[in-house]
Image (cartoon, rainbow, N blue to C red):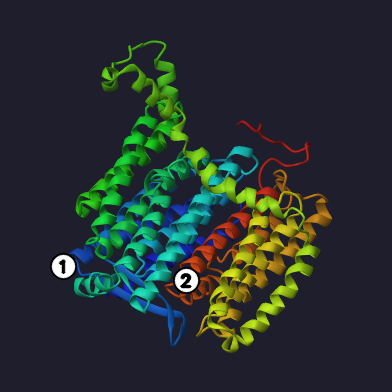
Amino acid sequence: MLTSILPFFLLLPLLGYVISLFIPAKNETFISRFAFGTMGLHLFSSLGFVGLWLSRGLPSINLREWSLYKNPHYDFFIAFYFDHISAVYLLVGSFLTFLVTLYSRYYLHRESGYKRFFNTILFFFLGYNLVILSGNLETLLIGWEILGLSSFLLIAFYRDRYVPVKNAVKVFSIYRIGDVGLILAMWMSHHLWHANITFARLNNYELVSEHLQRHTLIGVFVSLMILVSAAAKSAQLPFSSWLPRAMEGPTPSSAIFYGSLSVHLGVFLMLRTFPFWEHQLSVRIMIGLMGLTTSFLASGITRVQSSVKSQIAYASIAQIGLIFVEIAFGLNTLALIHFAGNAFLRTYQLLVSPSVVSYLIRQQYYHFVPRVPAFEGKWPKRFRYTFYTFCLKEGNLDAFMYRYLWNPLKLAGKQFDYLTVDRAFYIFTPIFVLGFMAQYFNAHLPEQFSHYLPIGFSLIGLLLVLKAFTERRRVELSWTLVMMNHCWVALAISFNEKVTMHQIGLYLSGILLAGFAGIIVLKRLRRLEGDIDLNRFHGNSYIHPRIALWFLLCSLGLSGFPITPAFIGEDLVFSHIHANQLTLAFITALSLILDGLAIIRIYARVFLGPHVKSQYDMAYRSS
């Protein structure tokens, strides 16, 4: 009975999201009541299900639903798993989303994006439930992608302003690193287990211990990739700077996303995979040191913030750092209690923050209270002032990411400014044809030659997507180069054995369909608006909302979002990269990071931000 009820918690938000798309935007009352009713039904169903689960003796529920793609060497299937970790996250998530939905009914009254907000909240909740009920990494990745997209849409909710859109792109860039960390963990897991491993099987100590003893380095690599994904999602060092930037969205979305639920999913990932890395001492030390360092620095940064939202964001980061320390020590029950307490507290603080700020501003004129000496007042002055300046600059975390990650990539991409669509076609098409012929005669090529050809082809794809990432003038060129990158990735992987043309076709079918549809949409917009370069934000969703929606769907398809076969194709591509082809895996992963960023950058620049035509209302750039 419990097994048959579990899919209901995914079908309900999915059905609610689909129905909410067809509700007229002007009918605020019905929109809010429908969302409120959906979340209320989910909450009471969760309470009943958990109560029934407790009465049955807390059994672990493992449910394999269906295979999306299967061949003799690979099986991409959807699986669900429910235990005490899922139960805590399900109850906390249902209650807090229900609370925020109730709060938003009045907070966003007469807001132009009223319907869009509730649509996105239901979409987010679908992704959240997919993550916490997932039974394997593939299912978890689907929910992970949905959460990343809904985060971007809610941060850029005020899409006619410059800062929210810019910060949304920044946050998405960090999320993309986390996505690729998961993909790399899945890739190496396939080589470790020679199967699509489920979380239920990870609880088999003998099985895990046997595999890790024979493949210690592979186990450490998988654990580190999981840690990178968790750190990016939970804003741990060195990714902490994105969380206060995400507060540009509406206060209710800040509460539900970055105060309580989404930001704690990195913790969930570490708890769910704990049986895999619990006996890897080096990984546990790394997790503990990362959490402790993050907690210490975030606590200092919190104390010098002038914005109440930023204070709450860094306070939440500090507590999540402590939760990571608890997990590293194996105190999983304490970590779950800490998660629930931190989630409730931050949601409350964010929801009341506008009222509290207003109250404190008024009260300070009538009840002045001298500043209480802090504990750091006993520190040496030079150290105290240095630490204060360091915290005031938020640890230079943004500058660190730009200096050592994004700027080198941009500098490399600018070396190809001479490329146009025609030149890219005439230069790389003959090479691609030669590569395709080499793949056809692969069996007759020298072994060393066959080893380096895939790396060379994947490097060409990386160079193309670097140019797409840095292109600032021709939007069609940037879009086309992303499409070409996927083709070069497919060519590089095709040299490995067991890769069939059917599998390559599955991967490229969604890419090419979305890519050519996106070009048609861009051509249509250019006919209507004229100039749509990438030097500035154009805000075309202001007067072309339908075109913006179609282009967003094309962007999701081209980036491998779970709406086309390309999503399965990306995982399928990595499954054919051998365990000793780390260079090829790294180049392919970097290509996927950059193509997602190039695509979301195109969408943001062309359709979001202040409208390029001055007769429309626009916010100041520094708002």
Q: Which residue is mark 2?
A: 581
Question: Mark 2: few, some, or many residues within 10 Å (few <14, many ≥20)?
Answer: few
Q: Position of residue 607 (x, y in %)?
A: 69, 50
Q: Could you say which quadrant of the image residue 509 lies in?
A: bottom right
Relative to residue 50, is residue 255 depicted above or below? above
Separation of marks 2 and 1 at Cα, in angstroms: 46 Å
Question: Mark 1: few, some, or many residues within 10 Å (few <14, many ≥20)?
Answer: few
Identify which residue is drawn at 27% across, 55% down: 282
In the shown orientation, is residue 260 left or right of residue 405? left
* Residues at circles 2 and 1 in contact by the CB criterion of under 8 Å: no
Could you tell me if residue 333 is visible in this image? yes
Secondary structure under tag 1 reads: loop
Q: Position of residue 612 (x, y in %)?
A: 75, 41
Identify which residue is drawn at 29% across, 45% down: 289
Q: Which residue is mark 1?
A: 57
Identify which residue is drawn at 38% across, 31% down: 302
Q: Nearer the viewer, residue 378 or 274?
A: 378
Q: Amino acid at mark 1?
A: Gly
Q: Position of residue 604 (x, y in %)?
A: 64, 50
**Closer to us: mark 2 or mark 1?**
2
Secondary structure under tag 2 reads: loop
Task: Give the position of the C terminus as an image quadrant.
Answer: top right
Identify which residue is drawn at 66% across, 81% down: 436
Relative to residue 179, is residue 533 depicted above or below? above
Instruction: Specify which label sits upstream in the sequence, 2 or 1.
Output: 1
Q: Amino acid at mark 2?
A: Gln
Q: Position of residue 399 (x, y in %)?
A: 52, 38
In the shown orientation, is residue 250 left or right of residue 365? right
Q: Nearer the viewer, residue 24 or 428?
A: 428
Q: Could you say which quadrant of the image residue 211 lies in?
A: bottom left
Task: Give the position of the N terminus as an image quadrant.
Answer: bottom left
Could you tell me if residue 340 is visible in this image? no
